[in-house]
Image (tube, rainbow, N blue to C red):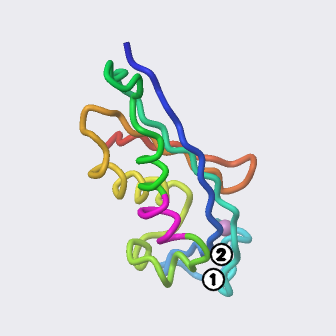
Amino acid sequence: MKVTVSRKAHFNAAHQLHNKEWTDARNAAVFGKCANPNYHGHNYELIVSVKGKIDPETGFVMDMKVLKDLIRSEVEDQFDHKNLNIEVAEFKTLNPTAENISVVIWDKLRPKIDKDLELSITLYETPRNFVTYDGDL
Ligand code: NI
């Protein structure tokens, strides 16, 4: 029997979506407002889900205090109120789309969580647009 536990978190961050191989016109056509060369912000909502067996000693799949602290140190402290393109090393050469941000967050958290637990990241870039990554290669 496996159960999924989830923790919600939040960060504000600025970004610009851009492909340097493309013309400004093509960047604007593909990325729309997110191509603004002067950057812009999003209120990102994050859901981190962990799936696994219930520990018979605690009754927990994972201690949520531990998960909360991990999200704070690995995601919020590094992304909140930052310019993702400029201030977060992973996005120096990687377009900070919701897809890529989700993969980066998964890669940061995966080594810190028990390997017997499955990890899934859901990231809302707007209230209506969200992506999910669970480690599928
Ligand atoms: Ni954007």
- Magenta stretch, residue numbers: 72-79
Residue to which mark 1 is pinned? 24
Give the vertical position of 21 relative to 128 (above or below).
below
Label 1 packing within 10 angstroms: few (<14), some (14-19), many (20+): some
Query: Which quarter of the rendered picture does the C terminus lie within?
Result: top left
Q: Is residue 76 magenta?
A: yes
Q: Is mark 1 on a helix, strand or loop?
A: helix
- The percent position of residue 49, horizontal first and vertical second, equals 48, 38
Alpha carbon separation for disc pair 1 and 2: 9 Å
Q: In this view, does 129 lie to the left or right of 84?
A: right
Classify mark 1 as within 8 Å of ligand 1 or not, answering yes or no.
no
Of 36 and 47, the residue lying toward us: 47
Which percent across, then down, holds residue 39? 66, 81
Q: Which mark is residue 10?
A: none
- Could you tell me what secondary structure mostly forms the magenta stretch? helix
73 to 121, vertically: above or below: below
Relative to residue 124, is residue 98 drawn left or right?
left
In-front residue for pair 66/125: 66
Q: For disc 2, does the CB lie below 8 Å from ligand 1? A: no
Q: What element carries label 2?
A: helix
Residue 112 in the image, given as x and y percentages of width and height: 30, 51
Q: Name the residue under label 2.
A: 35
Looking at the image, do the residues carrying marks 1 and 2 touch, with CB atoms under 8 Å apart?
A: yes
Front residue of 68/37: it is: 68
Using the rendered view, name the quadrant where residue 27 is placed: bottom right
Label 1 amino acid? Asp
In the image, farthest residue toward the bottom: 38
Q: Quadrant of residue 93?
A: bottom left
Left or right of 137 in this view: 45? right
* Quadrant housing residue 108: bottom left
Q: At label 2, which amino acid type do we have?
A: Ala
Quarter of the rendered image showing ligand 1 = bottom right
